Image (cartoon, grey):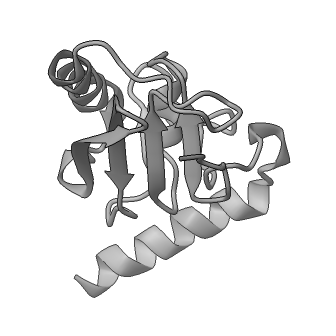
Amino acid sequence: MRFQESNTIELKQIVTDDIKKEIANSEGGVIYVGISDSGKPVGVGDSDLITQQIANMVRDSIKPDITKFIGYETQTADGKDIIVINVQRGTDRPYYLAGKGLSRRCPLRPMGIPANLVRTRAIIGIFQQSLFLHLLL
C-alpha cells in the first residue's frame, strides 16, 4: 500500500516536534506516522507508547485545548503498525504553540502549505472568523 501527501494528508516516518505544528493547523486532516516521505509504510515501534507521547505533546503544547478534535488509531499497512491521527477543524481557532504565543510565525496554515506562504490577511481572516463565531455563541 502506498500513501501520498496532499493538502489534508501528512506523512511522518517518525514523531518529531514538527508534528505539533501539523496538528495545530486550521483546516484539519490526517497525519500518518510510520510512513516514509515516498509513501511506503515503515511502521512504528510500540504504537501505544508513541500514541501516548503524541497525545501528551498535543495536550501540553497546543492552546487553546484541541484534544477533543483529535482521534488516534493504530492500523496495519503492509504488515506494519502505523498511527493514524485524525485532526478535525477546531472551533476555538486560532490554535498556537503554547511556548510561542500568537504571532505571524505561528503555524496557522492548512496542511501541505509552507509556513512562508501564509499571508497576514489569512491570519487576520482566521481571527475575524473566530471572533464572529464567539459573538454568535
Which residue lies most toward the bottom here? 136
* Image point (51%, 63%), residue name: 27
Seen at 63% across and 69% down, the residue is 125
The one of 68 and 95 positioned closer to us in this rendering: 68
84 and 24: which is toward the camera = 84
Q: Is residue 94 visible?
A: no
- Drawn side of residue 121 relative to residue 89, left or right: right
Residue 122 visible in this rendered orientation of the protein:
yes
Picture quarter containing residue 69?
bottom left
Position of residue 132 measured from the top left corner of the image (x, y, whole percent): 43, 80
In percent of width and height, residue 30 lies at 45, 52
Residue situated in front as seen by the camera: 108 or 133: 108
Q: Position of residue 15 (x, y in %)?
A: 44, 19
Q: How many marks?
A: 0
Residue at 30%, 13% (x, y): give it. Answer: 45
Residue 92's spot in the image, x, y percent?
33, 60
Q: Is residue 19 left or right of residue 111?
A: left
From the viewer's side, name the closer residue of 101 and 89. Answer: 89
The C terminus, quarter of image: bottom left
- In the rendered image, the vertical position of residue 60 relative to residue 135, given as above or below: above
Residue at (63, 51) in percent of width and height: 109
Vertical order, 71 against 82 (above or below): below
